[in-house]
Image (cartoon, helix red, strand yellow):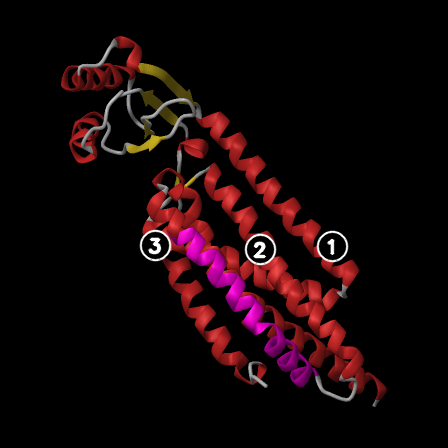
């Protein structure tokens, strides 16, 4: 049987180091909000041919130094369309940039088929709705755990979710990745994945309570995690391999796969090494308080 609970201080120390590094970077650099939240311009151009991306980016960055470019696959078209996202590009620069692209790649005027500007007020509204969505998701899942199990399970699960959110936020701050709507969708997915993994361990603990009535909480937790460890690792590895494949072979969804990859690793770790040790701590403290009150 694995001795996981006995090494709780080590697991907490590892998490604390990772989170502190991320939080220092977050305080120092802040989050880089993407166009969805900060506002800006999205331009779509149908190039109609394969082009050298480095050469293309050289032209675009002259007019929009902060621009992010990617090729989006469109149904019914064999070649992907160019999408340019920039916070600061002006209408005049768009015209000049397109004129150079038009001359370089022999484009028609109709090639610039979409130019959308997102205002700061719209970005602020999206930011509020994203926070509301995350809050509702977390509260809803905690209520479910509290009803299905007990309050201490819910409190332990909440701390593991906080752990995962802080790890992903720190990762974004360190690498200065843009926080946008894809990030929010990924965070909701991560929370759901982490809770699901945590519930598997908690469910096994609840089942084992029927057969290990004389065992203490440490032994009960260790036995339950030993029984579910292979499942957690296999599931996590399967998802990680899939996400790595998607990251390398489908570049248009990298903004979604990056936080998912970090979140799945963190969620798999926290469900075993954070949530369950916290449950043991809560149960042992409750047991001590009960003994003191009866003394």
- Report if residue 224 lies within the magenta region: yes
Q: Which residue is mark 2?
A: 193
* Residue at x-position 23% and y-position 19%: 93
Looking at marks 3 and 2 on the same chain, the residue that comes earlier in the sequence is marked by 3
Residue 143 numbered mark, or none:
1
Q: Position of residue 20 (x, y in %)?
A: 42, 64
State left or right for residue 199 relative to residue 119: right
Q: Which residues are magenta?
A: 217-244
Q: Is residue 15 magenta?
A: no
Compared with residue 4, is residue 32 higher up or lower down, i.e. above or below? above
Q: Nearer the viewer, residue 204 or 138?
A: 204
The answer to whether 189 appears left or right of 78 in the picture is right
Q: Are marks 2 and 1 in contact (CB under 8 Å)?
A: no
- Identify the image quadrant of residue 3: bottom right
- How far apart marks 2 and 1 lie (CA) works out to 17 Å
In the figure, is residue 236 to the left or right of 117? right
Magenta: main secondary structure: helix
| Real-space Cα separation, disc 1 to disc 3, in angstroms | 33 Å
Quickly name the residue at label 3.
174
Neighbor class of circle 2 (other Cα within 10 Å; few <14, some 14-19, many 20+) is: some
Residue in view at x 76 percent, y 65 percent: 149
């Amino acid at each position: 049987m694995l001795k996981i609970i006995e090494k709780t201080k080590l697991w907490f120390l590892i998490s604390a180091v990772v989170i502190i590094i991320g939080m220092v970077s977050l305080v120092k650099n802040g989050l880089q909000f993407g166009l969805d939240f900060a506002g800006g311009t999205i331009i779509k151009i149908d190039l109609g041919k394969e082009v050298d991306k480095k050469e293309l980016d050289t032209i675009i960055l002259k007019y929009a130094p902060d621009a992010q470019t990617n090729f989006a696959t469109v149904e019914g078209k064999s070649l992907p369309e160019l999408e340019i996202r920039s916070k600061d590009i002006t209408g005049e620069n768009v015209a000049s940039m397109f004129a150079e692209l038009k001359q370089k790649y022999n484009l028609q005027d109709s090639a610039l088929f979409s130019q959308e500007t997102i205002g700061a007020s719209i970005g602020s509204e999206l930011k509020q709705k994203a926070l509301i969505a995350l809050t509702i998701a977390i509260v809803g899942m905690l209520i479910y755990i509290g009803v299905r199990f007990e309050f201490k399970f819910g409190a332990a699960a909440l701390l593991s979710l906080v752990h995962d959110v802080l790890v992903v936020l720190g990762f974004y701050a360190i690498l200065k990745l843009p926080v946008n709507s894809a990030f929010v969708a990924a965070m909701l997915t991560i929370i759901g994945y982490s809770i699901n993994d945590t519930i598997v361990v908690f469910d096994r603990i609840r089942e084992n309570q029927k057969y290990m009535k004389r065992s203490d909480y440490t032994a009960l937790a260790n036995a339950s995690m030993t029984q579910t460890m292979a499942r957690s690792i296999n599931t996590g590895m399967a998802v990680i391999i899939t996400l790595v494949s998607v990251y390398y072979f489908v570049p248009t969804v990298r903004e979604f796969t990056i936080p998912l990859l970090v979140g799945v690793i963190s969620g798999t770790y926290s469900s075993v090494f954070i949530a369950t040790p916290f449950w043991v701590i809560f149960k042992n403290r409750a047991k001590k308080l009960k003994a003191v009150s009866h003394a």
